[in-house]
Amino acid sequence: MDRSAAGLNAPRRCGLPRRLGCLAYDLLVLAAVLMLASLPAVLANRGALRPGLIGYQLYLAALAAGYYIGFWARGQTPGMRAWHVRLSALDGAPLAPDGRWRRLAIRWLAGGLDLALLGAGWWWSLAHPQRLTLADRLSGTRLVVDHPWRDNSR
């Protein structure tokens, strides 16, 4: 099998099992962050929060958005780092600073929409030739496998 140097160093597409691994890891970290961030509100309400507090729900949503968008701006969330995945533009290049925040906000909102649709965009990735999800397509980004032991500079 003939494999060119360019083919060896080309980023591999991230499949659904690896995406789910990243998501599971990040949800554990995010749950811990949200619990710590909720501590002042729980203490202020003597251990009980009434359901339906819209301000509190918006606060948690803003923290979740900040978690993902902040880490994506650096290229990887903790879960992506553990699973050797990084975020890039659709062409495989790092995200350019111009328009990066808009792309990342769109990715986060599309990911929320995808969860509301019971993962329809993720299931779609199984049939897509480039394994792109709804969030990938709408934001112009994609996840690629990033092997730290491989020299990608050549």
Image (spheres, rainbow, N blue to C red):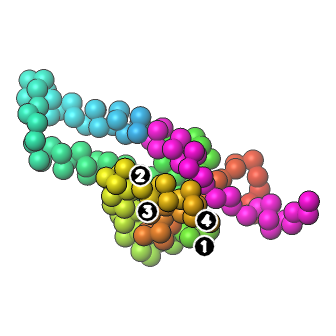
Q: Nearer the viewer, mark 2 or mark 1?
A: 2
Residue carrying label 1: 91
Residue carrying label 3: 135
Quarter of the image containing the C terminus? Answer: bottom right
Q: Tag 4: residue type?
A: Gln
Residue carrying label 2: 119
Q: Tag 1: residue type?
A: Asp
Question: Is the residue marked by circle 1 packed among few (<14), some (14-19), or many (20+) residues within 10 Å?
Answer: few
**As drawn, 119 above or below 10:** above
Describe residue 49's horizontal placement relative to residue 103 as left or right. Answer: left
Give the mark nearest the N terminus, 2 or 1: 1
Does the magenta stretch mainly form a helix, a strand or a loop?
helix
Q: Tag 1, which secondary structure? A: loop
Give the mark nearest the N terminus, 2 or 3: 2
**Mark pair 3, 1: CA separation:** 15 Å
Instruction: Look at the image and tell me whether residue 130 can be seen.
Output: yes
> Quick one: 73 or 136, which is closer to the camera?
136
Describe residue 79's horizontal placement relative to residue 107 as left or right. Answer: right
Q: Tag 3, which secondary structure? A: helix
Q: Tag 4, which secondary structure? A: loop
Residue 149 in picture, x, y percent from top left? 75, 47
Q: Tag 2: residue type?
A: Gly
Give the mark nearest the N terminus, 4 or 1: 1
Instruction: Look at the image and tell me whether residue 70 can be seen.
Output: no
Residue carrying label 4: 130
Q: Tag 3: residue type?
A: Ala
* Magenta segment boundaries in residue numbering: 1-26
**As drawn, 108 above or below 17:** below
**Mark pair 2, 3: CA separation:** 11 Å
> Residue farthest to the top?
47
Residue 153 in picture, x, y percent from top left? 75, 63
